Image (tube, rainbow, N blue to C red):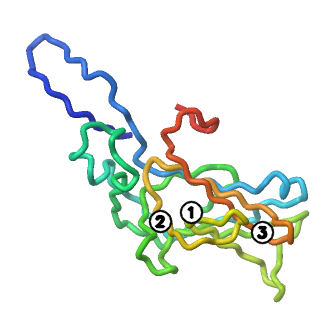
Amino acid sequence: MWGVKKVSFTLTAGKRQDFSDVDLLRAVAKVKVNLSSEMKNNGWSIHSMQLINYNNKGYCMPKKYAECEQTASLTHEEFSHFYDSSQSGNITMTEGVPIYLPEYENKGRKDADKCVIKLKLFRNGTVEKDNSGNEKEYTLRFINYTDDGAEGTTINNIVRDHYYTFEVYKGSNGQNLVKLTVRKWKVLEHEEIVM
């Protein structure tokens, strides 16, 4: 957690200072993947899921913290402070269980170096296969997705104090599609956020 508030005061021995409230935000991002209820009801589950390309270290404070009067005045663009500690290994993920990540800069990287999630699906005891008979692997990218679940072109960095939720679902044509929802994590009304 981190927070900023500029205050003016004079230190006086034996006197307590009241700084009022200081908004605290998280120094990491939260990432989670779910299958839609419809897919689960039709016998689908996640066979394997790996997060690839990520940082295992990061800065506690954003770059612009010293220039703001209080935490809430920072804009989305001012939240980031990327530390490059890229890892070549993978993190095994579990459906519906969030992982917490330091910030990662996807913009400006080659596709092979961007943070992605690779998953394989299982249906009624069998791993889904492609036309060649190999296990089919899907790549979930941190990008915008169109309303019909297709990949868009806007690349998302993974930014502190944001909550990234991927939902995999079947389209009307039977094709697997993706919805990515990105929220500011500080929204206290969200049912999955526990303070």
Q: Find the distance from the CA under tag 2 to the CA under tag 1.
A: 9 Å
Marks 3 and 1 in Cβ contact (< 8 Å):
no
Q: Bin the neighbour count of mark 1 within 10 Å (Cα to Cα): few under 14, some 14-19, many 20 and up.
A: some
Q: Earlier in the sequence, mark 3 or mark 1?
A: 1
Q: Earlier in the sequence, mark 2 or mark 1?
A: 2
At label 3, counting other C-alpha atoms closer than 10 Å, the crowd grade (few under 14, some 14-19, many 20 or more) is some
Tell me the distance, in whole angstroms, between the alpha carbons under discs 3 and 1. Answer: 23 Å
Q: Label 2 sits on what residue type?
A: Tyr
Which residue ends up furthest to the top in the rendered image?
14
Task: Work out whether residue 161 or residue 89 is closer to the camera in this orientation and state it.
Answer: 161
Q: Position of residue 13 (x, y in %)?
A: 9, 14
Residue type indicated by callout 3: Asn
Name which residue lies at 52% across and 69% down: 154
Residue 59 at x, y percent in the picture: 32, 53
- Residue 91's label in the rendered image is 1
Q: Which residue is mark 3?
A: 176
